[in-house]
Amino acid sequence: MKRHFSIFLSSALIISTLVGCSGHSSSVSTRPKSTPSPTPAEDISSGSSTDSTNLPMTYTDAKALYDSWKSIDFNPGKDFSKYGAYYVKKADNAFYSLLPTMSSSYESRVILINDQQENNIPTISRGSGDSLILFSDSNYLNTVYLCSATESGYTLPLSLGMYGFSSPYAYSHISKNYESTALAPDSIEVLPDSYTSTGLYSLHNATLDGMSYDEIRALPNAIQDDSLSYIISLDKGTSAHIEHYEGTDYGEANITADYFYWVLDSEWYEGLGTEYYEPIVTELPISLTKEGYAEVDISSLTPNYYAVPIKGYFDNFNKFHANSSPFVVFQIVD
């Protein structure tokens, strides 16, 4: 049976679109059929996103930030603080917080961040003495789990599903416009997706550059995100036009491919009428230090992007599952 666990509410964010293909992807460029724009469209671009800077912190500041997370009044079952606060510790003892991402659907293999955050992903150079560390209050934490990326590129902040378009930009059906509120103003704050987005609002009767769901998923640069939804790999800055109806009310907007995505290494499961992706996790040992944090053994990892599931679940066979978890990310560059 398909596992739908209520560990946390997955956010509004899948991505999917159509137009050319990203320079990060090997897909063939495809142009969608054009449609006229009867009225001036709302322009949605990275310029309206909240700029975030991952500033270096001292040990004291990093520990204080973790302590502040423990005071957050999470809903039942969403206490992520006990899973730890992750940092890249540089050789000069500067601490950089791993940045949170948004997921595209409940059982998604795609995660993404906006382009400002992309420039602030913490990097680890092991040759320079950098390390991955975490603070935690758990007495049962002996290992941590990581997921690696198999592909990366740029896409629109839009999910294309069989039952409608959904977006990390919150579409307000009251003001009839889009609001760039996908991520919390403080990008360092680790929160579940349901807190970093104003919520999912699915647009039915929608097209993207005149293309429907069936046409978009047939594009060579379409990437299947979960069993029913897709993203499209695009060149950064590519613009696409969305049109939709709410009842008989018409709406439109121009959306820019300014979100950086990566596809998690995942396995595809199907059977008994269900199909879904599940991220593959690598279990790494940790060691406690007298400095009050644990250090993760990343010696076996190759240079790549990595995502740390903040909260997953164990099945009856004690296997850890990362689907339905928020992630924080870093990059190994050596």
Image: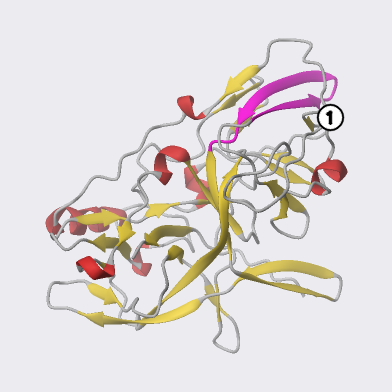
Residue at position x 81%, y 69% from top?
274
What is the three-letter code of the residue carrying label 1?
Lys
Q: Residue 292: percent from the left, percent from the top?
A: 16, 72
Residue at position x 87%, y 45% from top?
214
Q: Quadrant of the N terminus?
A: bottom right
Residue at position x 63%, y 30% from top?
171
Q: Residue 113: percent from the left, percent from the top?
A: 49, 46
Foreground pick, 284 / 77? 284
In reply to whether residue 39 is colored magenta, the answer given is no
Foreground pick, 75 / 204? 204
Q: Residue 316 occupies which quadrant of the picture?
A: bottom right
- Residue furthest to the top in view is 39
- Can you identify the residue that label 1 sits on? 33
Q: Quadrant of the C terminus?
A: bottom left
Q: Is residue 300 left or right of residue 182?
A: left
Q: Residue 207: percent from the left, percent from the top?
A: 80, 32
Q: How many neighbours does mark 1 have within 10 angstroms: few (below 14), some (14-19), or many (20 or more)?
A: few
Residue 184 vs 243, above or below: the answer is below
Give the image's coloring scheme. secondary structure
Q: Residue 270 occupies which quadrant of the picture?
A: bottom right
Foreground pick, 257 / 136? 257
- Magenta: main secondary structure equals strand
Q: Is residue 141 left or right of residue 102?
A: left
Residue 314 in sight here: yes
Q: Residue 196: percent from the left, percent from the top?
A: 47, 44
Foreground pick, 197 / 58? 58
Residue 133 in sight here: no
Residue stretch rendered in magenta on the structure: 239-258
In reply to whether residue 253 is colored magenta, the answer given is yes
Disc 1, SS = loop
